[in-house]
Amino acid sequence: MKKSLVLIGLISALILGGCGSKKDATKDNFEEAINARLEKKCIEIGRMYRDLPIEISTKDYEKKSLDNLVKVGLLASKPEKVEIESMFGNNKRMEDGFVYTLTPEGDKYYQKEDKVFCAGRYEVKEIINFSEPLDVLGRIMTRVKFTKIARDVPSWAKEWAGFSDNKNFAMYVAENPIEDSADLILTNEGWMHHRDFR
């Protein structure tokens, strides 16, 4: 009788010990893994294709997008004569143009390495469903479908999204949930986004 009670106690301890493990395939664990990934990436706007300050001619195709960043206070511009290279780079000439520089407000949000402005981040609103975890090339993986919402979105980002040529971006900074999916891998530490797995 005593042996049976000890055995039952050991089995119960093992079961309880396994409860709440970060390795379990649960919505809470998946939400934590996806949020860890989302926290590392900001909602990007206004990608630059060269280092600031930027000098362009008045005819440059980038002018409209740069002017939109001026309108929301992230960049400042001033008219100047600028040196422009020919398409083949073998001839330079001076033209009427503009020089764009960061404002103090823009400096708070500009990510120099990626040449973008950070307009907040996403977080998981709800885990909708997930596939049965399976062995894929020696790794246990699952695909998780979820909704996410934007947080910490500055007012300038919403204003920028309202401009006619940025309309497609408006949904990314809206308060409505956006559907997304992620592939997660089971590691010895628990679940992890596949892009974070090294």
Image (cartoon, rainbow, N blue to C red):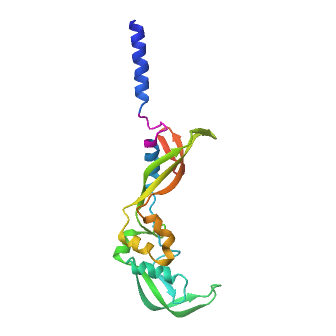
Q: Relative to 181, is 79 on the left or the right?
A: left
> Residue at coordinates 43% horizontally, 24% vertically from top-left?
14
Res 144 seen here: yes
Q: Is residue 118 above or below residue 53?
A: above
Q: x, y percentage for residue 66?
A: 47, 80
Q: How many marks?
A: 0
Would you identify the image quadrant in which residue 176 lies?
bottom left
Was residue 131 drawn as part of the magenta stretch in this picture? no
Residue bounds of the magenta highlight: 20-28
Q: Position of residue 60 (x, y in %)?
A: 54, 86
Q: Residue at x 36, y 68 (%)?
A: 154
Furthest-left residue in view? 104
Report the residue at 41% width, 81% height from top. Answer: 70
Q: Position of residue 190 (x, y in %)?
A: 47, 40
Question: Is 18 situated above or below 5?
Answer: below
Report which quarter residue 136 is drawn in. Answer: top right
Q: Nearer the viewer, residue 95 or 165?
A: 165
Tell me what residue is drawn at x 44 percent, y 62 percent: 42
Magenta stretch, main secondary structure, is: loop
User: For this rendering, which residue is in front, 123 or 63?
Assistant: 123
Would you say 159 lies left or right of 179 here?
left
Q: Nearer the viewer, residue 128 or 137?
A: 128
Q: Position of residue 142 (x, y in %)?
A: 56, 43
Is residue 53 visible from the viewing direction of this image? no
Q: Residue furthest top?
A: 1
